[in-house]
Structure formats: structure tokens, C-alpha cells
Amino acid sequence: MITKHGGRLLGTAAAALGAIALMAPVAQADTPAKNYEQFAGCPSKNENPEISSCVRSVVKSGNFKMGNKNVPIEKPIILSGGANEFLQNFSATPKGGMPPVKQKVPGGVIGLTGLTWLLEFLGSEALTLYAATELAGQPKFFGIGQITLPIKVHLINGVLGNNCYVGSVSNPITLNLSTSVSPGKNPEFSVDAFEILHLNNGTYVDKTFSAPGASGCVLTLFGFIPVSINGLVNAQSGLPAASGNETVQNIDTELVEVGLVYP
């Protein structure tokens, strides 16, 4: 049987169904009570009086296909923080938020740019490419099974410069993640002895989002001549892409009332 605390938390479950949420870090963090240490990213009511529930969400696996590049989600992406009773004003302490997690991109920089001659100068190891998802706006929640999430994707390798992105705050990739799209699946509900609500093994899918072209990708020749390679990245990656994109995210979530974390 779900306790009164667990029952109320069902109403806030949507706040943790995405891998990402807009974070506004606070200056310092109180210390969670014993058995609630995993919620250290959640502000206490002393830090943010609007906080009603603490949340920790983990994207365990899945994939993110954008254009003709398909990146497996091999390293867990962790989101932790808190939300008010209306699922708004999501915020986090310095121990929370959504730290960037680098996922390896198949094909590396050569596959992204088509510049095969880079192998002669740098070697294959130096051309390993990573992608990290970052926030690009405020998510919107629509019940247990859907979340709208604006993001941008950082393409990471020194050859590309420090600011090679697909998507931006002004032109984000907007995901509409849903459990009702195949192979989506609603999470399994349970409440443990510490009145933590668990929503495990949920699968969230979006097959309809569009992706803009790359920006900020710069190759520096001879160590001092910057050359934009946005066009090369777009041509090799099939960007911009209005269709044919897809993400599947397998997510576990924990939710608990803030008063239990910070009694």
C-alpha cells in the first residue's frame, strides 16, 4: 500500500521522468538526514521555501539519434534537485543539477567532419568524439507519461574548438518524451521503508523532434588560423534534420517529501 507521503508524491512524479531539468543552483546546501543522502542535490525549505519534493532521476541506457549519427547512452545521466507542488521552479543545490556526461560518438571526429587527413597529424586516439546533453530552456511536464524538454548537444573534441553545439537556447532541440510511443513503457511504482517513491524501468521515447544545424565548430589550422567547419559537420551528420531523429531513454526515478530529507 502506498503511504500518504507516497500518494502525494505520485502527483509530482512527472518532475523526474526526463533525464534533464532546468536547474537554478543555490548558494549552499544543508545536509540530508541519514538514508536520504542521495537527495543532497535537493534544496531544503530553508534554502528554497517553495520546494515540496526531492527527486533523483537516472537515465540508465538508451540512444540518441540526430541526423545520421546515433549515439548510445552508455554512461548514466543523473538529475537531482527539487520541485514545488505544481512541478514548477525546479532547482538544485551545488551538489545537484545535471552534470554533463560525455557519451562516445561512433566514428569520432573523422566521421563527423570527413577530414580523413587529420589522422596523419593526430592519430585515431586524439580524434575520439564525445557528445554531452545540456539544458537549453525550461521543461514542461504533462502527467506521468510525457515531458517536453529543450536541450542542446555539445560536441566535444579539441579539433572542433570549445563551442561546437547542435542546438542553442534561442534554437533548441525540443524533445517530447512519451511512454505511449513504441517502445515506450510506464515505470513500475513502489514505496520503500523510508517512504521514498520509486518509479523504475520507465522507457520514454520521441521520434518526431527536429534538429538544427551545428554552430561554433572551428578548426584551427597551424595553431592560429581559425576556420569554421559548421558546413562540414552538417554535411557529414545530415543536419539540419526535420525528421528521422529518435531518442529512447530508460529511466529510474526516486521521489520523496522534502520534510523527510530535511526533518
Image (cartoon, rainbow, N blue to C red):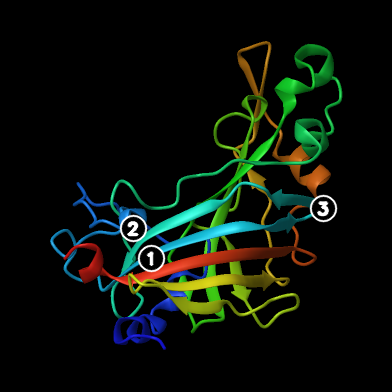
SS at mark 2 in the image: helix
Q: Quadrant of the N terminus?
A: bottom left
Q: CA distance from mark 2 to mark 1?
A: 7 Å
For residue 66, which quarter of the picture?
Answer: bottom right
Q: Relative to the observer, which residue lies in front, 198 or 60?
A: 198
Corner quadrant of residue 12? bottom left
Side (left or right) of 178 relative to 47? right
Q: Amino acid at mark 3?
A: Asn
Q: Residues within 10 Å of mark 1 (few under 14, many from 20)?
A: many
Please tell me whether mark 1 sits on a helix, a strand or a loop.
strand
Residue 23 location, x and y as percent? 36, 57
- How packed mark 2 is, by other alpha carbons closer than 10 Å (few <14, some 14-19, many 20 or more), is many
Question: Which residue occupies the foreground of this view, 69 or 190?
Answer: 190
| Residue 255, position as x, y percentages in the image | 39, 70
Residue 60 in the figure: left or right of residue 94: right
At 30% across and 82% down in the image, what residue appears? 5
* Contact (Cβ within 8 Å) of mark 3 with mark 1: no
Q: Quadrant of residue 183?
A: bottom right
Q: Which residue is mark 3?
A: 68
What residue is disc 2 on?
39
Q: Position of residue 186 (x, y in %)?
A: 61, 80
- Mark-to-mark CA distance, 3 and 2: 37 Å
57 versus 156 height, above or below:
below
Which mark lies nearer to you, 3 or 2? 2
User: Disc 2 vs disc 1: Cβ atoms closer than 8 Å?
Assistant: yes
Give the residue drawn at x 67%, y 71%. Answer: 205
Q: Residues within 10 Å of mark 3 (few under 14, many from 20)?
A: some
Is residue 20 visible in the rendered image? The answer is no
Residue tagged 1: 55
Q: Is residue 97 left or right of residue 118?
A: left
Label 3 – label 1 distance at C-alpha: 34 Å
